[in-house]
Amino acid sequence: MSDMQIRVSDADRERITQRLQQAFTEGRLDHLELEDRLGRALTAKVGADLTKLVEDLPAATPSAEEEAVLLETVHDHVKRTGDWAVPRRLRIVTKHGGAHLDFTEAIVPHPVVEIELELKYGSAKIVLPEGATANVDGFRTTYGSASSTVAGRPRPGALHVVVTGGSKYGQLAVRYPRKRWFTQS
């Protein structure tokens, strides 16, 4: 039996969907092609099904960008709001501080952003733009909590954030921006 006839895993499907989303952001696929290929990727049974979806795309090459950007503090908060460039992989380490990441005005050139949080006594708040999704299943806490009020499944053409890591005493909250009732905007 060849590799092309072996059944694929969820991780294999996820890797191909990320590659398709990257091709879309590069302008190699239009919206309809992306939706069609993502649908077929998510229902693929064997390796040949996935290979057909990316055979006309350039090979994925690891770049220097694969290295995670490290933001570290001991007694303060890591805060990113407004117009900031989001790396594909972000690692935040704090001992007594926390993290506040606001993606609503950020420049996000990647369809999937991975955030690893190491918070000993701190908490983290992540604010995503409307329509974005987040998977917080990889975040663990001992005496705190992790909550997300955003969709958890990736959507074609929308930002997807994967949060991993943990906190001993802190909490994680992932949400959309709050609506302002008494303003014009």
Image (cartoon, grey):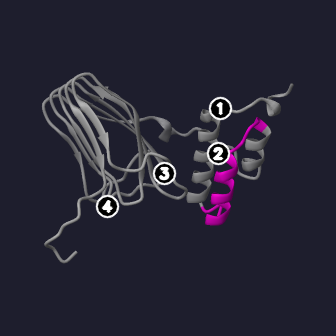
Q: Nearer the viewer, residue 108 or 125?
A: 125
**Nearest to N terminus: mark 3 or mark 1:** 1
Cα–Cα gap, marks 2 and 1: 10 Å
- Residue 14 left/right relative to 37: left
Q: Nearer the viewer, mark 4 or mark 1?
A: 1
Q: Secondary structure at mark 3?
A: loop
Circle 2 residue:
42
Identify residue type, mark 2.
Answer: Leu
Cα–Cα gap, marks 2 and 3: 20 Å
- Residue 164 left/right relative to 16: left
Does residue 61 appear anywhere in the picture?
no
Q: Position of residue 31 (x, y in %)?
A: 61, 65
10 Å neighbourhood of mark 1: few (<14), some, or many (≥20)? few
Q: Secondary structure at mark 2?
A: helix
Circle 3 residue:
110
Asked if the residue at tag 1 contacts the one at tag 4, i.e. Cβ–Cβ closer than 8 Å, the answer is no
Identify residue type, mark 3.
Answer: His
Q: Secondary structure at mark 1?
A: loop
Cα–Cα gap, marks 3 and 1: 23 Å
Circle 4 residue:
105
Cα–Cα gap, marks 4 and 3: 14 Å
Magenta residues, as a range?
Answer: 27-47
Identify residue type, mark 4.
Answer: Glu
Q: Nearer the viewer, residue 55 or 36?
A: 36
Identify residue type, mark 1.
Answer: Ser
Cα–Cα gap, marks 4 and 1: 35 Å
Circle 1 residue:
9
